[in-house]
Amino acid sequence: MKFFIDTADVAEIRELAATGLVDGITTNPSLVAKTGRDFLEVVAEICDIVPGPVSAEVTATDHETMLTEGRKLAAIAPNVAVKVPLTPDGLKTCKVLSDAGTEVNVTLCFSAAQALLAAKAGATYISPFVGRLDDIGIDGLELISDIVEIYDAYPTIDTQVLVASVRGPAHVIEAAKMGAHVATIPPGVLKAMFNHPLTDKGLSAFLADWAKTGQSIL
């Protein structure tokens, strides 16, 4: 499974990219707004830090304007993936951009039927929002399972399942078990994946035993 980080915080991206665990970045207008910076400048800077796909979202809702915005975003850097909403105009835009060789991330997916439409429109990624479904009492991970099953049934479908709205490590692990291709993870969730009390306990014991020897590797 590939790990994308769901943030527009450049400092946080630099820190996490240094671990070698980051395969890409997803942003959206809300995340960029939190930075208080120019949207296009932020996207360009992130593209310089992370060689993998950087999803940058259009803000228009009609096809013609979405297409113009998408082309402008794609021109920022070769690793930009244009993010469009799962609407008729969004999928129309997806088709044009993907036919031109631009990676497209179709976002705000909440059903397997929508995911099938996105795949037929040539989406590079489909972003089902598991956490938001959980919030209204629907099992978001069941949607991941359904989409993976459908895509796997058709070898000609190249669209990757990008698990979004991740709320904790359990979402990542369960989605990985189902065969999802990508999870886009908030920085705090990725950091939480490092943690286990037995790791901390074991490290403390090793360090205590080493201290007793009075030795130093350096």
Image (cartoon, helix red, strand yellow):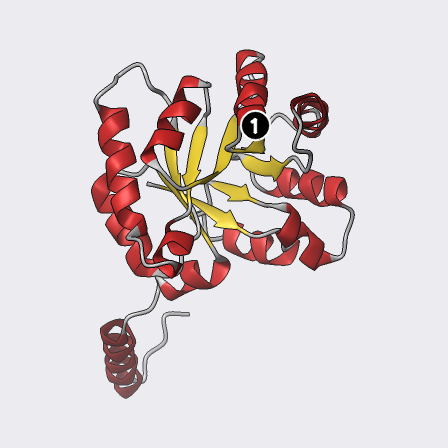
| Rendered view: 126 above or below 184 | above
Q: Residue furthest right?
A: 38
Q: Nearer the viewer, residue 5 or 146?
A: 146
Secondary structure state at the residue bearing disc 1 = helix
**In the image, is 68 to the left or to the right of 182?**
right
Residue at 24% x, 40% y is: 145
Is 182 rendered above or below residue 199? above
Q: Position of residue 178 (x, y in %)?
A: 22, 42
Q: Residue at x 31, y 53 (%)?
A: 138
Q: Position of residue 79 (x, y in %)?
A: 58, 29
Alpha-carbon neighbours of circle 1 within 10 Å: few (<14), some, or many (≥20)? many
Q: Quadrant of the N terminus?
A: top left
Q: Residue at (57%, 32%) from the top-left corner?
A: 84
Residue position marked by numbered label 1 in the rendering: 90
Q: Nearer the viewer, residue 88 or 7?
A: 88
The x, y position of residue 216, in whole percent, is: 36, 76
Against 175, is 148 above or below?
above
Q: Quadrant of residue 65?
A: top right
Q: How many marks?
A: 1
- The type of residue carrying mark 1 is Gly
Q: What is the x, y in percent for residue 89?
A: 58, 25
Check the picture and name the quadrant holding the C terminus. Answer: bottom left
The residue located at (36%, 61%) in the rendering is: 168
From the viewer's side, name the closer residue of 52 and 27. 27
The image quarter in which residue 189 lies: bottom left
